[in-house]
Image (tube, rainbow, N blue to C red):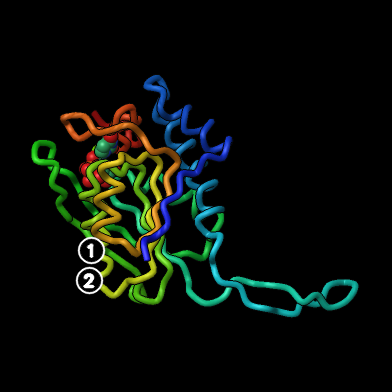
Amino acid sequence: MMGKFQVMDHPLIQHKLTIIRDKNCGTKEFREVVNEIANLMAFEVARDMPLEDVDVQTPEGVAHAKQISGKKVAIVPILRAGIGMVDGILDLIPAAKVGHIGMYRDEKTLEPHEYFVKLPSDIDQRQIFVVDPMLATGGSSIMAIDALKKRGASNIKFVCLVAAPEGVKALQKAHPDVDIYTAALDQKLNDKGYIVPGLGDAGDRLFGTK
Ligand SMILES: O=P(O)(O)OC[C@H]1O[C@H](OP(=O)(O)OP(=O)(O)O)[C@H](O)[C@@H]1O
Ligand SMILES: O=c1cc[nH]c(=O)[nH]1
Ligand SMILES: [Mg+2]
């Protein structure tokens, strides 16, 4: 069965996305707002986390209540830009572990290159949120998810801020089991592989490089 594809059109998310699309938004605000959007998105991405019954003694009696059970979470940012989304998700799921996958896109060929992988040892038993603000050609996210699956991961969701139709199609084709969440589905890629209108180079805008 094809994974879910969801554009998160909540007004708060849309408003904040508009702030960071603005080319005059500086590094400090960009970094803060990326985390705020990731935080709001995590609320929905975590919707199907499994619950178990638990009885809890309140001051007035016993409540037949729920708590999160089963699979633990790992957040896996694709370096560099994915790092910008981690703290916003950790605010909601503070016990999550964080794995890192380093990936850069060759500026000419647009081919992704993996340069770093460091994951929690029990990655095969975790619900994984792969995060990267930009889904452009899809090359980076496909290769990052390949790297995770090679190490036994199976329960994977991909969370981005802006996606291009080309990238969504490629990622769905390569990894049909992976749910994709984005704050926006934009028009297209330009001849340099940038998303139009997008928000420019997410890594550079987050870290103040270039
Ligand atoms: O879908 P794709 O066509 O693969 O493009 C998207 C990738 O490009 C950007 O990373 P970049 O290579 O610029 O590295 P950076 O995060 O270190 O800047 C972005 O953060 C994604 O990882
Ligand atoms: O538009 C794009 C495409 C790839 N990577 C980015 O940071 N921005
Ligand atoms: Mg970049």
Q: Residue furthest top?
A: 24
Q: Residue at x 25, y 42 (%)?
A: 166
* Residue at the spot 53% in from the left edge and 59% down from the top edge: 46
Whether residue 60 sits left or right of residue 15 in the image: it is right
- Residue 127's place in the image compared with 166, above or below, is below
**Residue 182 or 105: which is nearer the viewer?**
182
Q: Amino acid at mark 1?
A: Asp
Q: At x 40% / y 64%, what residue is drawn?
A: 128
Disc 1, SS: helix
Query: Image quarter for residue 11?
Result: top right
Callouts 1 and 2 close, C-beta under 8 Å: yes
Q: Is residue 173 left or right of residue 54?
A: left
Front residue of this view, candidates 132 and 171: 171
Q: Which residue is mark 1?
A: 146
Residue extending farthest to the front is: 1
Q: Which residue is mark 2?
A: 150
Q: Quadrant of ligand 2?
A: top left
Count of numbered circles in the view:
2
